[in-house]
Structures are given as C-alpha cells and as structure tokens.
Image (spheres, helix red, strand yellow):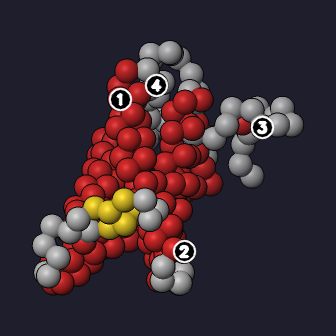
C-alpha cells in the first residue's frame, strides 16, 4: 500500500497511532500513581509492567517509523493548509520525545536497579548514589510530562482542524467505517 491514493491512513498506521496513544497514557498513569500501590509485590508488579510496556513502546515506535517509510499510506496535507512543514516537524519532535522517554526509562532502570516481577533483578549501576537515582527519575518524569503535553497539543490541533478549518484532517486517522457502517470519510462537522 505504498503511496496509495486515499483519504484516510491505512488500518495498520491508524492502529499504531492509537495503540501508541493508549500505551503512552497507561504508562504515564502508572508512573504517576506508582506510589499509591502498597510496597512489595503490588508495587513491584506495577513497576515491572511499566518497564515492560515502556520497552514495548520503544519497539512499537521503531516499527511505526519503519512502517511510515516502507508501507504506510502517505497523505498530503489538507488542501490550503500552509503549515505542512511545521506539522511534519511537530510529528518528528513527538517521535523524538517518545524515543528519549524510552531511553531515559531504560537508563533509570539501570541506574536504580530493579526487581522485575519478583523473578529476576537488574543490578544498580551505582547503588549508593541516591542523587543520580533521583535526578534520573526526575528527568524521566519531566520528559513524560512534556510528552503528555505535546500529545494533548497534537490532539487539540486535530480537533481544531476538524472543527475550525473543517478540512477533515482528524477523520483521516479515525476508523474508515464504524460498526454501524457510517463512512467517516463522508462525515462533516456541524
């Protein structure tokens, strides 16, 4: 399906987009509310899931970038949209921040050391260096919060396009057909 004329992205591109969005939100929530879970097995399980899903996000991002360049539908900017270059740069920045978040998460696990599902332990890089551990956690958290803000701005811009410009940009990433058989390509906002 390389460069197939279309008004929507292909199914795999849409699935990768929405899967990444859901995964990012779940990871952010798990990171923010980790301390709510009791110490011991519940917290270890949630942290272990956070680490595993974070690694999965890195794999998903890598595949998503590969798919975008080797198989996914490439759509031109909506007609009359003068900011296509800026939108492209914004997407690249979002990808870069996701990658940075995954890398800092891996670094944090290595710096802090961790116990994964009570099955095996990852030894700490410098066990006595509490400042390094604290700083790595802070940087990872700042990047995660920045990414959440960037994703929210991304969603707001898609809504702005749909509701103000009425150029159908948002509909290109939504499912082509809903379960009721409504063709999203022919929907117009009121």
Q: Earlier in the sequence, mark 4 or mark 3?
A: 4
Rendered position, 73 above or below 180: above
Rendered position, 140 above or below 175: below
Residue found at x 15% / y 67%: 125
Crowd band around label 2 with a 10 angstrom C-alpha radius: few (<14), some (14–19), many (20+): some
Dots 3, 1 in contact, CB < 8 A: no
Q: CA distance from mark 1 to mark 4?
A: 9 Å
Can you see residue 157? no
Q: CA distance from mark 4 to mark 3?
A: 21 Å
Q: Residue furthest front?
A: 119
Q: CA distance from mark 3 to mark 1?
A: 28 Å
Q: Earlier in the sequence, mark 3 or mark 1?
A: 1
Disc 4: which residue: 72
Q: Earlier in the sequence, mark 1 or mark 4?
A: 1
Q: Earlier in the sequence, mark 1 or mark 2?
A: 2
- SS assignment at label 4: loop
Dots 2, 4 in contact, CB < 8 A: no
Disc number placed over residue 66 in the picture, else none: 1
Disc 3: which residue: 178
Q: CA distance from mark 2 to mark 3?
A: 38 Å
Disc 2: which residue: 42
The answer to which of 14 and 166 lies nearer the viewer is 14
The answer to which of 79 and 171 lies nearer the viewer is 171
- Residue 114, located in which quarter of the rendered image? bottom left
Q: Earlier in the sequence, mark 2 or mark 4?
A: 2
Q: CA distance from mark 1 to mark 2?
A: 36 Å
Crowd band around label 4 with a 10 angstrom C-alpha radius: few (<14), some (14–19), many (20+): many
Residue found at x 26% / y 68%: 113
């Amino acid at each position: 399906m390389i460069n197939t004329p279309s008004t929507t992205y292909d199914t795999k591109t849409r699935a990768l987009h929405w899967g990444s969005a859901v995964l990012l939100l779940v990871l952010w929530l798990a990171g923010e509310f980790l301390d709510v879970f009791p110490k011991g097995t519940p917290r270890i399980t949630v942290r272990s899931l956070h680490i595993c899903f974070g690694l999965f996000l890195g794999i998903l991002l890598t595949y998503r970038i590969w798919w975008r360049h080797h198989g996914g539908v490439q759509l031109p900017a909506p007609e009359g949209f003068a900011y296509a270059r800026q939108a492209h740069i914004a997407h690249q920045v979002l990808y870069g921040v996701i990658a940075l978040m995954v890398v800092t998460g891996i670094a944090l696990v290595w710096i802090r050391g961790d116990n994964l599902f009570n099955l095996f332990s990852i030894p700490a890089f410098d066990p006595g260096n509490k400042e390094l551990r604290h700083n790595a956690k802070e940087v990872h958290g700042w990047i995660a919060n920045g990414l959440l803000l960037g994703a929210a701005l991304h969603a707001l811009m898609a809504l702005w396009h749909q509701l103000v410009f009425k150029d159908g940009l948002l509909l290109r990433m939504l499912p082509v057909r809903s379960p009721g058989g409504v063709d999203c390509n022919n929907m117009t906002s009121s």
